[in-house]
Image: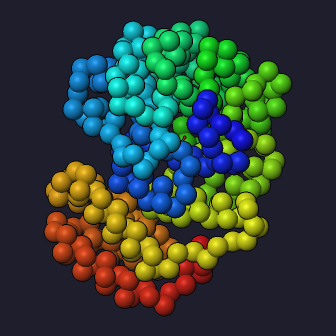
Amino acid sequence: MPNIAHIQLPEFPLLLAPMEDVSDPPFRLGCKQQGADVMYTEFISSEGLIRDAIKSRQKLDFFEYERPIGIQIFGGDEEAMAMAARIVETTNPDLLDINFGCPVKKVVCKGAGAGVLKDVDLMVRLTTAVVKSTKLPVTVKTRLGWDDQSINIEEVAERLQDVGVQALTIHGRTRAQLYKGEADWSLIAKVKNNSRIHIPIFGNGDVDSPQKALLYKNRYGVDGIMIGRAAIGYPWIFKEIKHYVQTGEILDPPTIEERIAVCKKHLLASIDWKGTILGILEMRRHYTNYLKGLPNIKEHRMKLVNCTDINEIDAVLHNIQKTYTNFVMQEVA
Ligand SMILES: Cc1cc2nc3c(=O)[nH]c(=O)nc-3n(C[C@H](O)[C@H](O)[C@H](O)COP(=O)(O)O)c2cc1C
């Protein structure tokens, strides 16, 4: 079993990726209910935590049912990262994850996220500062390297393991690739097959179907898979992969009734968590994915994103369910 420190995991765990402005508790609820084995918060600025910025603080919150859960932080300053780690520890998550993979300019410019891939010594110092500041198991999520000319994930993996990192998730792209091209899992497999590496290695990048998940499991030998975009509006991906890995059978896709029910649950959790106005507003970005594959859905979706009242949204969702009740999702899956 690819356990992380004392945290027991199933034989082939599926992890929900940290995603900024997506991986909040209302979104995580659906993923947990559909089988995500480990979940992470979106990344949180170490500097923001120290400044006690309300936005950063709120991102630390989670529910007991979400365990095992990791809180992800980022930053480019050792002292700030150490202090942030101590703040994270007070909230008692199961894991603390460091982000060394974010490609966004405003993060990279500060020498944080994937920016650290250009300076492995700094990466090691930042990680050491965090490991020494907390009793929580520390994990890292990173990319293959800065660009094609400087792929250094093998060195990174060995050095992070040496300073106490307990698991590593590798997104099979370089920083320069951003989200373009295809993730290269062969380099993830190289790390996994390195005889010096004994911590769990989780693969990440482009897994969006049970077939791909099983293929990558077998071909690349990773200890588990982290899933991001494919879970947005489709939390069933976790259940579907698990079932396929265990039985070789493809589950029927969720019916329109199930889709609408889970979407509604997400909306209500969002309102509960953020209040009515923000809860409704922030839910808008999820409708497209919940309704993906339904023909001529645009008109309904436009109505949904213009509603400001829960009863109106309810009526539109009900209407969508009625309209598509006999539609078989498999036709478009
Ligand atoms: C909207 C969005 C926000 C993201 N935010 C984060 C983040 O906060 N921390 C992080 O480590 N990765 C972040 N990522 C990267 C994902 O965790 C993941 O590595 C990437 O999407 C590739 O996996 P996928 O192909 O399964 O989506 C983000 C990705 C997306 C699409």
Residue 172: quarter of image? top right
| Residue 237 image offset from top left, x and y in percent | 57, 61
At a point 37% along the width and 67% down the height, the residue shown is 263
Q: Residue furthest bottom?
A: 326
In the image, residue 6 lies at what x, y percent?
60, 32
User: Which quadrant holds residue 43?
Assistant: top left
Above/below status of 63 relative to 232? above
Residue 262 shows up from this direction: yes
Task: Give the left or right position of residue 103, taking residue 321 as reference.
Answer: right
Q: Which percent across, then down, holds residue 71?
A: 43, 34
Image quarter in which the C terminus is found: bottom right
- Of 317 and 178, which appears nearest the observer? 317
* Picture residue at 52% right of the left edge, 75% below the top: 254
Count the marks: how many? 0
248, above or below 184, in the image: below
Q: Position of residue 314 (x, y in %)?
A: 25, 76
Residue beneath the point at 55% across and 57% down = 35
For the residue pair 325 and 199, the one nearer the viewer reads as 199
Relative height, residue 62 to residue 322 (above, below):
above
The answer to whether any part of residue 184 appears in the image is no
Image colouring = rainbow
> Looking at the figure, which quarter contains the N terminus?
top right
Q: Is residue 199 left or right of residue 320?
A: right
Residue at the image point whose x is 38% and y is 83% from the top: 321
Q: Nearer the viewer, residue 147 or 215?
A: 215
